[in-house]
Image (cartoon, rainbow, N blue to C red):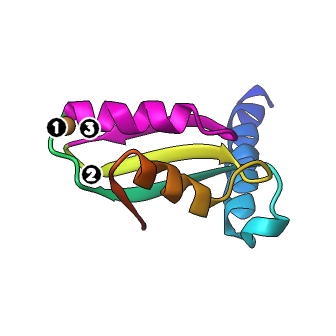
């Protein structure tokens, strides 16, 4: 029984996050995780500046930018910020974000 709880709870959380992510942006509620391909990074410092730009963006809960993969993973509250706004925030920092 304990084992079942350990497995079922994360599965439940993942599926809630997954479905919230796939609804239309305007009607979604809850957390959403999206990955974006980033163009224009030339070093780890670029990744760090994107991370801090995202950190200052309202609705962003967590974000990780990996220079070597050119990928930004962003967990955000879709009731507070749209994916378009995330792309705009990255653009404002000087980089191009593409939806994957
Ligand atoms: Cu750089």
How packed is label 3: few (under 14 Cα within 10 Å), some, or many (20 or more)? some
Residue 19 at what x, y percent from top left?
73, 63
Determine which residue is flagged by label 3.
Answer: 46
Question: How far apart are the two marked residues, 3 and 2, measured between alpha carbons?
Answer: 10 Å
Viewer-nearest residue: 62 or 84: 84
Labels 2 & 1 near each other (Cβ < 8 A):
no
Labels 3 & 2 near each other (Cβ < 8 A):
no
Viewer-nearest residue: 78 or 8: 78
Labels 1 & 3 near each other (Cβ < 8 A):
yes
Specify start and end residues of the magenta stretch as a single range.
44-67
Identify which residue is drawn at 71% across, 55% down: 15
In the figure, is residue 20 to the left or right of 90?
right
Determine which residue is flagged by label 1.
Answer: 43
On whether ligand 1 comes within 8 Å of the CB at mark 1, the answer is: yes
Residue 43 at what x, y percent from top left?
16, 37
On whether ligand 1 comes within 8 Å of the CB at mark 3, the answer is: yes
On whether ligand 1 comes within 8 Å of the CB at mark 2, the answer is: no
Residue 28 at what x, y percent from top left?
80, 62
Q: Which type of secondary structure does the marked residue at label 2 adopt?
A: loop
Residue 59 at what x, y percent from top left?
69, 41
Identify which residue is drawn at 80% across, 31% down: 1
Determine which residue is flagged by label 2.
Answer: 70
How packed is label 2: few (under 14 Cα within 10 Å), some, or many (20 or more)? some
Residue 62 painted magenta = yes
How packed is label 1: few (under 14 Cα within 10 Å), some, or many (20 or more)? few
The earlier-in-sequence mark between 3 and 2 is 3
């Amino acid at each position: 029984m304990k084992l079942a709880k350990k497995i079922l709870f994360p599965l439940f959380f993942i599926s809630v996050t997954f479905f919230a992510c796939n609804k239309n942006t305007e009607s979604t509620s809850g957390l959403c995780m999206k990955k974006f391909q980033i163009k224009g990074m030339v070093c780890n410092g670029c990744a760090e500046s994107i991370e801090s730009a995202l950190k200052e963006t309202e609705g962003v809960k967590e974000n990780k930018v990996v220079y070597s993969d050119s990928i930004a993973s962003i967990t955000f509250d879709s009731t507070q910020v749209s994916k378009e706004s995330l792309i705009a925030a990255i653009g404002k920092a000087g980089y191009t974000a593409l939806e994957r």
